[in-house]
Image: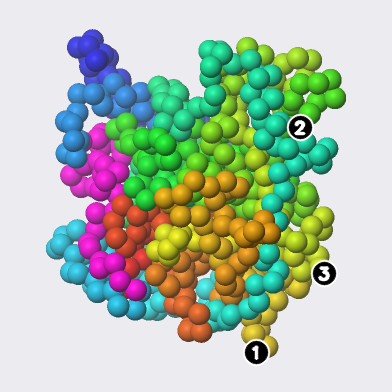
Amino acid sequence: MPTLGDFIRAFAISAALTVACPLLDGVATATVGVDSGGPGGASHGGGNKNANKNKKRQRQYSHQKNAQRQHALRDLTQILAPFQKAGTDTRALPYNWQAADEKTAPWTGLNGVHGVDNKSWDKQVVRDPAPGTAASAAADPAADPAVDPAADPPANPVVGAQPVPTPVPMRTTGTGDYTLTWDDRNAQGNTYGDLIQGLRQDLRFTPPGYSYTKVSELLAGSLPGGPFANRRCPAPMEDSGALVTPQGERVRNVVDWFCLAPEDATGMWTPQGISGTWDSTAQGTAYDDTARAFVFTWHGPANNSSRVTFLNEVGVGPFNHYQHVLLVNPFKDASGPVSFDPMRIHAGGVVWYHQYLLIADDNREHPENNGILVFDLRDLFDLGLSAVSDITNTGRPIGLHNGTYYSQGNRYVLPLRGIWRPQVTGVRCASMSSPPCFGYLGLDRSTSPPSVLTGEWCDPRQPTPTCRPASPQAAAPTGRVARYRMAPDTSACDRGCLAYGTDDRARATAAYTQPTPWTQGGISWNGLYQFTMSNNKVATLGRRYDAVPGQPPVPHFAARGVQELYWHRSTQPPILWSITEGEGVKNRVLYGVNPWIS
């Protein structure tokens, strides 16, 4: 419990920030001022060079200043948080800009907009939202004049350098390419189960009885130092943020959102897929755990490494802590002990079901990993408990070297359990042999048992047999989406819980063409499909499409650089979350929308 001294120090920090920030702004302005004349000045030949240097200094100062403010305010929030009221009326610092009354939205109220009956999509009736609420403003065109392509398409919308394609109806297509076989052995013939058991022993954990780290323990391990996501930070809602454009276009019906810490908003890692505990179990907690969390995937440069991140839904003031986990590929080291390499996958999509993470991969640089990869969270290892690991050295290659395990600074690792592979193996998904590409995953819990969708990234500038026109009349190829059954919630399962037959093969129950190329994510609920489309990280807004097979899709704006989709089922019908891949605090966000408001 904080002491009075802690409170006084927090107040002093706040006062110092109030006084110091304007002074720093003035100093910075004077420091980075541009010379408008004289030799080498802006009016002469050397002006552009000097101006560019000054602009660079100004940007650097701005980044440093924002980071200092965020860190100071985060520390202040952690001190003040225990003094705040308990329960749903907890008030956060004004810095989080959550609402006019500065109230924190607890996770149970994430989607507290208006109720919609849990009926099929074409029979849903939207109840009138409470006057004055965010939902009321979103539902009232007079109060929310922003452009939306479903009602008023822009004259010449573009995504990146390519025109936004006209969406076409989904068409039924064959499921033959979507027969999968289970592979739980690495290239040397060792089973991943045996390798993981050997790795658990070779890491020499303390205490000796340690088996794995639960997600709730992993999230607790990220406190008090973070990293932290800033809930409802203002940047994505400002001009040219991920959710708006200066022309008045913006993503409508946004319910909630998160910005990542500055060190994760830029850099070598790129986010891709999103899921969470509302996929994992019917009650919305992690399997065999109490955690309520999001999970999202990343790939490193050239798809040579990958990781997942768990974000706690329960915040500390305006911040929610999260933790990275490195994905690794175990193998038998020539000297005897088990080692591991980074997982060289694109990690384009993720579904968290039971204790498993299913991750889609279509990495063309390493086609040996193409398919649906399975990771068991009961194999999540804390290298901080290993007597033979070094989690401080960020320069050594990942794996076992001279008797020590290195992870480039990552405290947690999660090894591969197996891969569901298409029957056509050993070739790239874009080759002439027509194996499907696994670009994303999305769980549908409105079916019984639950089912998972997987679809393809399709670039019409590089058409292939798997990236082909949706119909003979279609102008551009669109790729395909397929559905698989999952094991029921009530039964034990293995192999990632994908349902398979007596021949040990998993078969798609349906397959369709997608509405557009450049599909980044796809999901469904009660027969209504949702797809996201974007072909550029930082250009204009992406698109989200409501689609029913055989009917014209309905377009809506989606965030700039939008990726995969996840149903957050804390209300019925659920709220639709996504993640963006652009760089910068304003461009890299997790956000949720209510897609049921017309």
Query: Against 161, is 559 above or below?
Result: above
Judged from the image, the secondary structure of the residue bearing numbered disc 3 is: loop
Q: Nearer the viewer, residue 578 or 349?
A: 349
114 in the magenta segment: yes
Determine crowd level at label 2: few under 14, some 14-19, many 20+ residues with C-alpha closer than 10 A.
Answer: many
Left/right of residue 497 with respect to residue 372 in the rendered view:
left
Instruction: Find residue 524 and report its image quarter.
Output: bottom left
Determine crowd level at label 1: few under 14, some 14-19, many 20+ residues with C-alpha closer than 10 A.
Answer: few
Residue 388 visible in this rendered orientation of the protein: yes
Mark 3 or mark 1: whose residue is earlier in sequence:
3
Residue at the spot of label 1: 473
Please tell me whether mark 3 or mark 2 is closer to you in this view.
Answer: 2
Judged from the image, the secondary structure of the residue bearing numbered disc 2 is: strand
- The span shown in magenta is 91-120
Residue 407 visible in this rendered orientation of the protein: no
Type of amino acid under label 1: Gln
Q: Position of residue 598 (x, y in %)?
A: 31, 73
Left/right of residue 206 with respect to residue 112 in the rendered view:
right
491 in the magenta segment: no
Q: Residue furthest front?
A: 502
Residue at the spot of label 3: 432
Mark 3 or mark 2: whose residue is earlier in sequence:
2
Q: Position of residue 428 (x, y in %)?
A: 79, 59
